Image: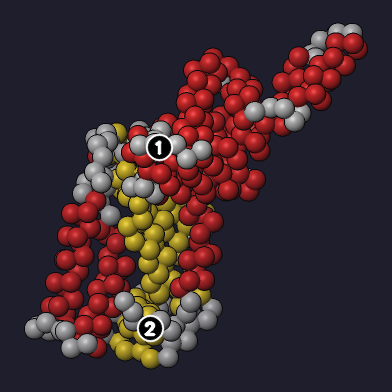
Amino acid sequence: MVKYSHTVIYWIKGLSPSQAENSKEIIINLAVNFQLVLTSSPDTYCFEGDRHMAVAGLLLNGMFGLANSGTFEERLEETLLEIKESRKQKFGIGVYLIFLRRRKINTFSPSHERELESFVVCFDGASKQEIQLDSEPKIQAALSALTLAIDNVLGITKVSDSVVFFREDGKPIYSYTGLAGSAKLFVSQPISISSVESLLHWYEIVDSDAELERVNRLLLSSLQTEDDALRSFLFAWNALEIFINKIFGFYELKFFEELNVGNYPNARRNYFERIRTVMKDKYKLADKFTLVAFMLCSEGVDQDSEKFKKINKERNNLSHGQDVVETALPVEATQKMVRKYLQLHLGYLH
């Protein structure tokens, strides 16, 4: 029986390793054969994916007569070092979130296969795309949980996404389907133990709540396009707008129910119901946000309402074709607004 290991590695902008020795690598078991790892040293988890990529490069070079001197093993070692060094230069020291999923696969039928001392190379063994698509919902839930558990996440960049197969004896199989081939300052903050502990809590909530999947996906898209301020802002704004419209009816009903708590005449109840009916199609988005903010965070409603109005004004300037400075768009403020009220709403429900 052949098994596979699906490893996806993300660099998390805005975080730095904790000073505590025991928090350098934190493994969170979320389900059977599914783990998340927070670490400042991703090389061990990158190794099989790096070697898989290095072998592909050497095979391509050989096909096109570009092979360098030395044995295959020497060239492989050199290529692995180059990949590792390139990753260090691009991302440097920081925190990486690593998604690990290991499962058995029933169908594995390679068309060509060659066994080397440390690994096996084959073609068309199984569909990696199906494996990656199957993992996607759990990856999205894990990333959403991260943004809710740790406030200082400023961006999420995918470092690598690899699927490696293993024989029963543990030997890796590298399967191929054909062979084809603006700087901003930010402050990284150490991860607290409480944030890490809450990651599992948020994952369980996000994974079980399909209603807000689109909102979470848009927020993640914003964090993953942080080098493009305009797109990042629009993703975050759309997440905020959809989120408020989706939950407004729930909190509007709660608001009027609280107004009617107590032994009041029917006339009072009818009056408030009449107000609600008349206002049904007249609420502006800012009005909806203010009511939601009041219900979830009454002590901060005035401040957050003003922030929302400023964000909304920038969005309106864009939609009306006015000149805006893209680098000055309130990307981070919008992301924080979505995350804050997602946390409050999900916390209220759960």
> Hey, which residue is sitting farthest left in the picture?
69
Which three-letter amino acid code belongs to the residue tagged 1? Asp
User: Could you say which is closer to the camera, residue 216 or residue 200?
Assistant: 216
Q: Which mark is residue 323?
A: 1
Q: Nearer the viewer, mark 2 or mark 1?
A: 1
Q: Is residue 1 shown left or right of residue 244?
A: left
The residue positioned 22% from the left and 46% from the top of the image is 93
Residue 307: % across, % down: 47, 24
User: Could you say which is closer to the camera, residue 62 or residue 218?
Assistant: 218
Q: Quadrant of the C terminus?
A: top right
Residue 216: % across, % down: 53, 45
Q: Is residue 211 shown left or right of residue 240?
A: right
- The chosen color scheme is secondary structure
Secondary-structure class at tag 2: loop
* Residue at image mark 2: 178
Residue 283: % across, % down: 69, 27
Q: Could one spot residue 36 in this view of the protein?
A: yes
> Hey, which residue is sitting farthest bottom in the picture?
112
